[in-house]
Amino acid sequence: MAEPGKDTRYRVVLGVGVGALVLDQLTKLWVMASLPYYGAVTVIPGFFDLVNIRNRGAAFGFLNRSDIEWQFWLFFAATLVSAGVIFMLARSAQRGEKMLFWGLGMVLGGAVGNLVDRIRFRAVVDFLDFYVGQWHWPAFNVADIAICCGALLVCLSMWLKGPSGRAS
């Protein structure tokens, strides 16, 4: 078995993950420097605002409550378990499965990006607010985009392999 630093599978996952993490953290720093807490700037009237809010919960505001502390530890543990699963999937995959490795890296980078926020602020910085009229999609960030797009790539990669485990 190859060592993590010498195996291209791990290098792709880590490289993409670090890229997603850096992009996520830079965009959050920019938003926090540009907007006051709970501030908003309309980018496309009636559709898109940049905001500066905190989410103590998970994706789309799940468990976003200030009166419970255990959700921090739940999401902290979930991130560590996810990272372990990501490296197990990378280790068991064939070296040529680039789509899978990119997807795993995106999920890893997004998860770690949100974990950095949880450690720093006990909440995740969200700033992308899409809406139509009074209907708002819950605000999100670059880490959330990386997680969702990465998960889509992982699923697509597995679907393309088919039940035989070989690319169709």
Image: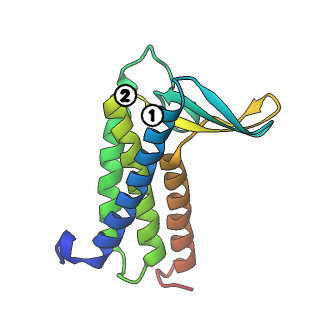
Residue 50 percent across, percent down from the top left:
62, 37
Could you tell me the amino acid type at mark 2?
Answer: Phe
Q: Is residue 9 above or below residue 138?
A: below
Colour mapping: rainbow
Where residue 16 sits, quadrant-wise, is: bottom left
Q: Residue at x 52, y 73 (%)?
A: 157
Q: Which mark is residue 82?
A: none
Mark 1 secondary-structure assignment? strand
Residue 8 lies left or right of residue 168; in this view the side is left
Label 2: how many residues lie within 10 Å, few (<14), some (14-19) or many (20+)? few
Figure quadrant of residue 156: bottom right
Residue on which disc 2 sits: 121
Q: Where residue 161 sits in the image (x, y, percent)? A: 52, 79
Query: Are the two marked residues, 2 and 1, in contact with CB atoms closer than 8 angstroms?
Result: yes
For residue 128, which quarter of the picture?
Answer: top right
- Disc tally is 2
Is 81 left or right of 61, judged from the image as shown?
A: left
Which residue is pictured at 36% across the width and 47% down the height?
Answer: 112
Task: For marks 2 and 1, give the CA distance.
Answer: 7 Å
The residue labelled by disc 1 is 124
Q: Secondary structure at mark 2?
A: helix
Left or right: residue 132 versus residue 126 is right
Q: Position of residue 142 (x, y in %)?
A: 51, 48
Quadrant position of the C terminus in the picture: bottom right
Does residue 82 appear in this view?
A: yes
Name the one closer to the observer, 119 or 19: 19
- Dot 1 amino acid type: Val
Name which residue lies at 77% across and 32% down.
135
Quadrant in which the N terminus is drawn: bottom left
In the image, residue 141 lies at what x, y percent?
Answer: 53, 43
